[in-house]
Amino acid sequence: MSKARELAELGGAYNDAALSNRNVIVNGAMQVAQRGTSFASVGNVYTLDRFQFYKQNSGAAFTVTQSSVTDLEGFANALKVDCTTADTSLASNEQGYVSYFAEGQDCQRLKKGHGSDAVPTTLSFYVKTNKTGLYTVSFFDRDNTRKVNGSYTVANTNWNRYSITFPADASGKLDDDNNKSLEIFFNLYAGADTNTGTLYTTWQASADAGSTTGQVNFADSTSNDWEITGVQLEVGSEATPFEHRSFGDELLRCKRYFEVFSPIQSQNGSIPLIRARTSVNGYNFAVSFFEKRVAPTATLDFDRVHKPGVAFDTISSTSVDVSTGETSSCTVNVTPDNDSTISTLAYLGKNSGQGELTLDAEL
């Protein structure tokens, strides 16, 4: 089939959009999991890269995992939510959802708030769940406190692709910056505060009522599980085929927000250190990492200093300095317990478990 005919049969879906870089979502195929692949008793935490699980005022409990996909062509991973403690009677202010946050500067293509030039946007994704019924999805414009909602209905327990087209919004421009502007909520359960009235599917001032109307209670049984992959947000009123990107490309995009630097499961060490001239046995080292969205929060988790040919010393203190506005480097400072075995060069390691420096610049 010729490329022209192939595009024609897609109904001109690509006419007004690029063949590549269509998808606003990073890690939509759930390939990257720098924080780990299993998260128990989750609540308001990032799990797989760029995706957060949130629950509010809920007695239910959930586990999130990076699941292996064997029954959906073109995908190998998904984000899976398992209900581990049920809640069959939701309080009015309860809710739980999987969320994704996008920078304003990455959403300018949506032309939101540009009057008659504003365009509709389409969110598409694959879901597999044994809890059938109606599910809701919410868009929240944090810059202008505006909201719109949509829904999809699960009729069977197979993988299915769903798409929701959200209308153009002539009002409320998204800020052209690196802050949180557009928020997407894949709702799983919700109490009467939001699950009431009529689901409002046009952009308007944000309100609770009508945000999740008709939403099933995914939390009502410990047998419930819900998986999602192939998440794509694009300009226009049609869902085009999912834009697959290489693992390396997705990993680099994810590292703008979070990075596990130089992980190692050995006391031999990974991050090099140099003894400061003004200290008997203190060490420091300037670490350069991938450019972050903002100056990150740095956390060091090592318990050994390896002085080659001299000793493996435990650590009495560590610190990480990130200068104001610095988005690509930090300084690691370490003091070993043993001040008598001086060595000019040393390495940070971990005696048990994984040693790592984490850099968090999430939205």
Image (cartoon, helix red, strand yellow):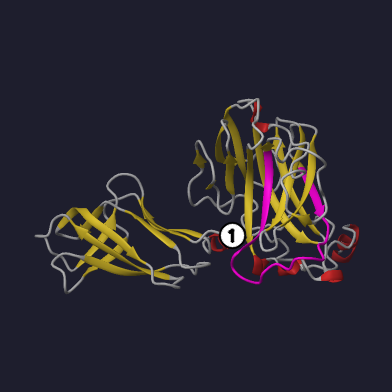
Residue where numbered disc 1 is placed: 250
| Number of numbered discs on residues | 1
At x 24%, y 56%, the residue is 317
At x 83%, y 70%, the residue is 115
What residue span does the magenta drawing correspond to? 161-188
- Magenta highlight on residue 172: yes
Going by the numbered disc 1, the residue's amino acid type is Glu
Query: Is 89 in front, or is 84?
Result: 89
What secondary structure is marked by label 1? Answer: helix
Question: Residue 234 vs residue 274: left or right?
Answer: right
Rate crowding at label 1 as few (under 14), some (14 to 19) or many (20 or more) other CA atoms within 10 Å.
Answer: some
Tell me if residue 171 comes above or below residue 299 in the rendering: below
Residue 99: x, y in percent? 63, 49
Question: Residue 93 vs residue 38: left or right?
Answer: right
Residue that lies at the very extreme toward the left in this rendered image: 340
Residue 189: x, y in percent? 67, 36
* Residue 204 quadrant: bottom right
